[in-house]
Image: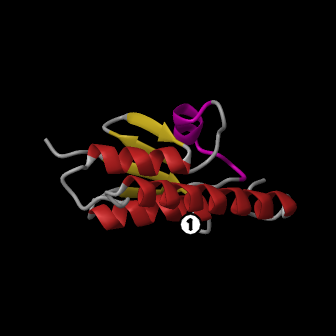
Amino acid sequence: MADEIILLDFWPSMFGMKVRIALAEKGLKYEYRDEDLFNKGPLLLEMNPIHKKIPVLIHNGKPICESQIIVQYIDEVWKDKSPLLPSDQYHRAQARFWADYIDKKISSIEMQQKGAFFYP
């Protein structure tokens, strides 16, 4: 049975882009569903009832939320594909540090732009 992968996203989202890059690097086929952040759809609200935000990866009917967690999940589930992180523990820690740093910078910038069309 083939995996069913659905990504709930909003195309300009940098967090969603990170997930799309991970899916592409693993060579995974998925269904992309663009979400209207001003009128959130029932699937988004059902799959992410806590934060009600994108991205959400739905794998065989089960939701995974938060971009960094989604990327880690993708790397762990599809181990047979090329790894997203280096095999060396130090280099892997450095990659995680920079991913976290970028996430925090993007969040900071987006919070400063609150009211912009990214997150109503």
Q: Which residue is rendered at x = 48% and y = 54% of the image?
A: 93
**Which residue type does callout 1 highlight?**
Trp
Q: Quadrant of the N terminus?
A: top left
Residue at horizontal 72%, vertical 53%? 38
| Front one among 15 and 42 | 15
Look at the picture and state if 72 lies above or below 83.
above
Residue 99: x, y in percent? 56, 59
Is 93 on the left or on the right of 10, as rendered? left
Q: Residue furthest left?
A: 1
- Is 4 left or right of 64, judged from the image as shown? left
Which residue is found at the position 44% from the left and 52% from the top?
Answer: 71
Q: Position of residue 116 (x, y in %)?
A: 81, 64
Residue 56 falls inside the magenta stretch: no
Q: Position of residue 88 (x, y in %)?
A: 35, 57
Residue bounds of the magenta highlight:
38-49
Secondary structure found at label 1? loop
Identify the image quadrant of residue 20: bottom left
Quarter of the image where one finds residue 101: bottom right
Which residue is disc 1 drawn over? 11
